[in-house]
């Protein structure tokens, strides 16, 4: 006998996990994709979805790779970075342009790619007021764009039904209608993107670097105990909402330096506790930078700051957090042990 018939959702999950793992390094083997998919389904508690043998997985990925390489030119263009010049060929409504541009800005700050396809979805989704801020728009446009891309290289039809449920129903409504439709089973989609929250209720921006990695880490397709431990530690720190960073410029400064630090090779060599200490020190430095607030009697004397209407603006010659960078280097070399 040939075993259970391959379900369409199974092929879709395999291809999505393959797409995700491709972003983490060299293209994974079929064996690695199969192992990651097994972990994912186990973590999801979905014992009703049966995986095929390795040979079948190899065939599925081979076909997906061929379809991806053979996509029409306009579909390949959708995967390229968005900027204003792309509006000539891929226009979006003028009334949504500012929201799209702010989402693009937020992506750049966090070192994230922002494709023409994501811009298309951000433009469509911005009309929903509860996703109008850049963080939510970036996450949701990523989710919709990735699902659309997966449908192009699989035998499945693009269906955004489950994403749409979350978009238009409240939490209670969504839980109720989901239970009516699917029972207690979770939705097994590797591109499902939830916002990570700190213990104080604010968004934990530190986890979203990059989004592809955050998703892989939390859906179980990748295992990194250090980063899971680190995120648990960071969740106990004050988020932007309670840290007191009143200036958006300071928030941007913090996120850009955080992204820079996390891309350094030293970052991967330190422990979770040491990494948490580096983040804590960077937060402290950001608050210290902001402490140079406007005071008519005692204007700031630190070169690199411009104050306009009680807002601290950052000039190009703003001093860098040298003590934080030094601490990272010392931890990496093993000079400091905790």
Image (cartoon, grey):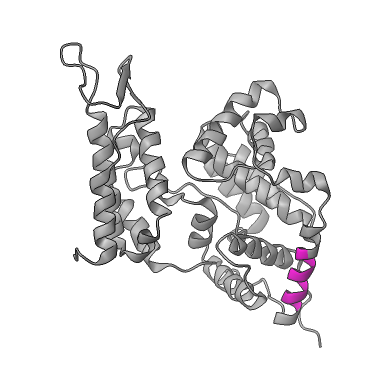
Q: Quadrant of the N terminus?
A: bottom right
Q: Is residue 131 magenta?
A: no
- Residue 44 in the image: state x and y as whole percent: 55, 65
Residue at figure coordinates x 40%, y 41% from the top left: 255
Q: Is residue 62 magenta?
A: yes
**Main SS of the magenta segment?**
helix
Q: Quadrant of the C terminus?
A: bottom left
Q: Residue furthest front?
A: 317
Q: Residue furthest top?
A: 296
Residue 91 is at least partly visible in this image: yes
- Residue 173 in the image: state x and y as whole percent: 58, 42
Apparent side of residue 73 relative to residue 294 in the rendered image (left or right): right
- Residue 231 in the image: state x and y as whole percent: 37, 56
Apparent side of residue 293 relative to residue 62 in the rendered image (left or right): left
Apparent side of residue 158 relative to residue 191 in the rendered image (left or right): right
Indicate whether 26 appears above or below 247: below
- Of residues 304 and 60, which is closer to you in this image? 304
Indicate whether 9 appears above or below 319: below
- Residue 275 in the image: state x and y as whole percent: 31, 57
Give the magenta part as a residue range.
Answer: 56-65
- Of residues 45 and 310, which is closer to you in this image? 310
State the count of labels.
Answer: 0
Apparent side of residue 278 relative to residue 80 in the rendered image (left or right): left
Indicate whether 31 appears above or below 154: below
Residue at figure coordinates x 67%, y 46% from the top left: 145
Residue 103 falls in image quadrant: top right
Q: Residue furthest left?
A: 297
Q: Residue furthest bottom?
A: 1
Residue 202 is at least partly visible in this image: no
Residue at figure coordinates x 34%, y 32% from the top left: 250
């Amino acid at each position: 006998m040939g075993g259970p018939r391959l379900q369409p959702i199974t092929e879709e999950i395999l291809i999505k996990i393959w797409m995700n793992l491709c972003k983490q390094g060299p293209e994974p083997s079929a064996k690695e994709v199969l192992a990651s998919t097994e972990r994912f389904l186990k973590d999801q508690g979905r014992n009703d979805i049966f995986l095929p043998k390795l040979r079948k997985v190899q065939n599925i990925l081979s076909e997906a790779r061929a379809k991806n390489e053979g996509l029409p030119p306009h579909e390949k263009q959708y995967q390229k970075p968005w900027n204003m010049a792309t509006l000539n060929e891929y226009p979006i409504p003028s009334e949504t342009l500012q929201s799209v541009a702010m989402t693009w800005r937020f992506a750049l700050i966090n070192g994230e790619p922002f494709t023409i396809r994501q811009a298309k979805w951000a433009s469509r989704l911005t009309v929903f007021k509860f996703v109008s801020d850049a963080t939510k728009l970036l996450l949701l446009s990523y989710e919709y764009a990735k699902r659309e891309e997966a449908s192009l290289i699989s035998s499945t039809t693009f269906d955004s039904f489950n994403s749409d449920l979350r978009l238009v129903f409240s939490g209670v409504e969504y839980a109720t209608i989901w239970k009516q439709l699917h029972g207690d089973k979770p939705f097994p989609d590797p591109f499902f993107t939830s916002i990570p929250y700190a213990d104080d209720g604010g968004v934990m921006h530190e986890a979203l670097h990059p989004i592809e990695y955050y998703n892989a880490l939390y859906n179980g397709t990748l295992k990194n105990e250090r980063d899971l431990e680190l995120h648990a530690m960071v969740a106990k720190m004050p988020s932007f909402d309670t840290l007191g960073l009143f200036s958006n410029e300071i928030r941007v400064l913090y996120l850009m330096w955080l992204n820079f630090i996390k891309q350094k090779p030293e970052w991967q060599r330190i422990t979770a506790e040491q990494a948490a200490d580096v983040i804590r020190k960077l937060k402290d430095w950001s608050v210290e930078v902001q402490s140079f607030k406007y005071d008519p009697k005692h204007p700031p004397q630190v070169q690199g700051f411009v104050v306009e209407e009680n807002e601290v603006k950052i000039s190009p010659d703003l001093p860098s957090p040298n003590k934080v960078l030094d601490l990272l280097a010392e931890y990496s070399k093993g000079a400091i042990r905790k």
